[in-house]
Image (cartoon, helix red, strand yellow):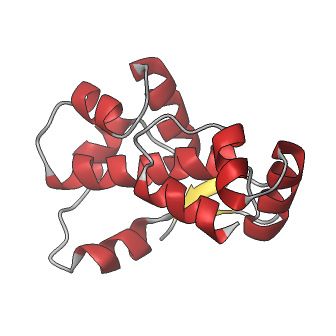
């Protein structure tokens, strides 16, 4: 499972599907999906979406690149899907996030940890970290 998660972390912008990830983990597709969720608390698809959104948060906060460019760079194929997913994970649209985000003077690793969307264990909905 760790090999598959590491592959998602490295290649978050590329198309990744359950069959490919299951091959990396050396298990069947069904076993991979069940075990990944049990191990990491979310489905492989949702984990990949969250990683993409985390990268987009950084780019929105620390660059002036257009939202559409960021959408495609982090691996989404549609601006609508990107915006809907971003809002679902972060709680605001990409443009609203950029408008309210403060460029941090801290190292990127600290900023990522502080702003990482977190999973609410009660309802399974991700929230932005405070």
Q: Is residue 39 above or below residue 95?
A: below
Q: Farthest residue in the left direction?
A: 64
Q: Position of residue 76 (x, y in %)?
A: 43, 30
> Image point 62% across, 59% down: which residue?
4
Q: Quadrant of residue 25?
A: bottom right
Question: Number of marks in the image?
Answer: 0
Residue closest to the eye, 117 or 8:
8
Q: Is residue 16 above or below residue 27?
A: above
Q: Quadrant of residue 92?
A: top left
Q: Position of residue 77 (x, y in %)?
A: 43, 22
Quadrant location of the N terminus? Answer: bottom right
> Image point 18% across, 30% down: which residue?
66
55 sits to left or right of 15? left
Residue closest to the eye, 23 or 70:
23
> Image point 43% across, 38% down: which residue?
14
Q: Is residue 118 among what the camera can see?
A: no
Q: Is residue 88 among what the camera can see?
A: yes
Q: Position of residue 42 (x, y in %)?
A: 74, 56
107 sits to left or right of 42? left
Q: Position of residue 80 (x, y in %)?
A: 46, 19
> Image point 21% across, 61% down: which residue?
102
């Amino acid at each position: 499972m760790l090999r598959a998660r590491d592959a998602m972390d490295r290649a978050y912008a590329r198309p990744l599907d359950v069959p490919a990830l299951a091959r990396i983990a050396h298990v069947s597709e069904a076993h991979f999906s069940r075990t990944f969720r049990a191990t990491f608390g979310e489905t492989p698809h949702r984990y990949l979406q969250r990683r993409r959104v985390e990268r987009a948060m950084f780019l929105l906060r620390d660059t002036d690149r257009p939202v559409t460019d960021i959408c495609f760079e982090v691996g989404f194929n549609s601006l609508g899907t990107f915006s809907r997913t971003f809002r679902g994970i972060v709680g605001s649209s990409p443009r609203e996030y950029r408008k309210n985000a403060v460029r941090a003077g801290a190292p990127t690793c600290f900023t990522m940890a502080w702003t990482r969307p977190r999973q609410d264990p009660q309802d399974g909905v991700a929230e932005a970290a405070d």
